[in-house]
Amino acid sequence: MNKIILSLIICLLTISCASRYGDFYPMHDDGKAKPRVVLLPTMDATERSSSVDYLIKQTRHQLRERGSLYLYPQECVERQLEKIKKVSFFNPDFSFVKNFGGADVIVATELVEYRKDRYGEVEVKCMPPHLHNKNLLTMKLKVRMIDLRGEQPTVVLQEIMTEQLLLPPTAWDSDKEKYYFKKLSERLVRDLVIRLENIALHVL
């Protein structure tokens, strides 16, 4: 009887962990292989290295939670990158992908813009009261997705994704900056993850 109870507990733990840590499993529940994805470190053209890591962590986290793709462990990706010279993932020459044999898709991202501007260029008297003294926060992320499943590597997605957020006219300090950076990042990553899944699962 005790053995039966123990077996049931183990089964329940396995099931509960499977969806949460979906990136650890290269197969779907029906036995079909998941697309194998290399998520490269996010490059930073804005010199915000202290915050840009949040983007890649959020992307991995959301893809893991959804469990549709198999993500190569981050340490494995970094180990492979150490073997090649420093290279831009967005160069026309993307021969670096040969270092990731076995992968189906390689995803590169770069934070290309992050800025805060006064909202609108018209006089305050011409704007609705609720927009007075507002600031507009803009974040732009360049994305490239390379499919390795054909005879030759093919760029199947390359675009700049943009998210914007209206900010209240309050003091701007480091704590608020971190808060809004995370808030805007989460919105951008949500859209990115949906795009990556749709392409990885349907482009062959």
Image: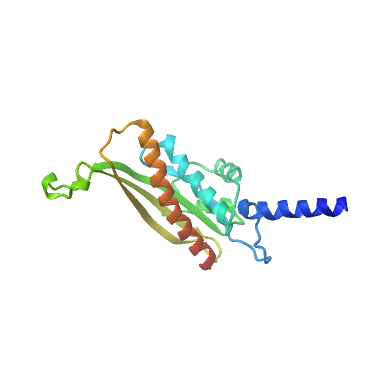
Q: What residue occupies the far right of the structure in this picture?
A: 1
Provide residue 70's location: percent of width, then percent of height.
Answer: 60, 56
- Quarter-wise, where is residue 135 in the image? top left
Give me the residue at 60% from left, 42% from top.
75
Rendering colour mode: rainbow
Going by the image, does 110 lie left or right of 150? left
Whether residue 141 is visible:
yes
Q: In this figure, what is the number of numbered marks?
A: 0
Going by the image, does 85 lie left or right of 113? right
Going by the image, does 50 lie left or right of 117? right
Give me the residue at 25% from left, 38% from top.
169
Going by the image, does 83 lie left or right of 45? right
Give me the residue at 67% from left, 67% from top.
30
Provide residue 6's location: percent of width, then percent of height.
Answer: 82, 50
Whether residue 91 is visible:
no
Give me the residue at 38% from left, 49% from top.
141
Provide residue 131's location: percent of width, then percent of height.
Answer: 21, 47
Provide residue 45's location: percent of width, then percent of height.
Answer: 37, 42
Rendered view: 135 above or below 174: below
Of residues 123 and 42, the one nearer the viewer is 123
Rendered view: 97 above or below 76: below
Rendered view: 198 above or below 61: below
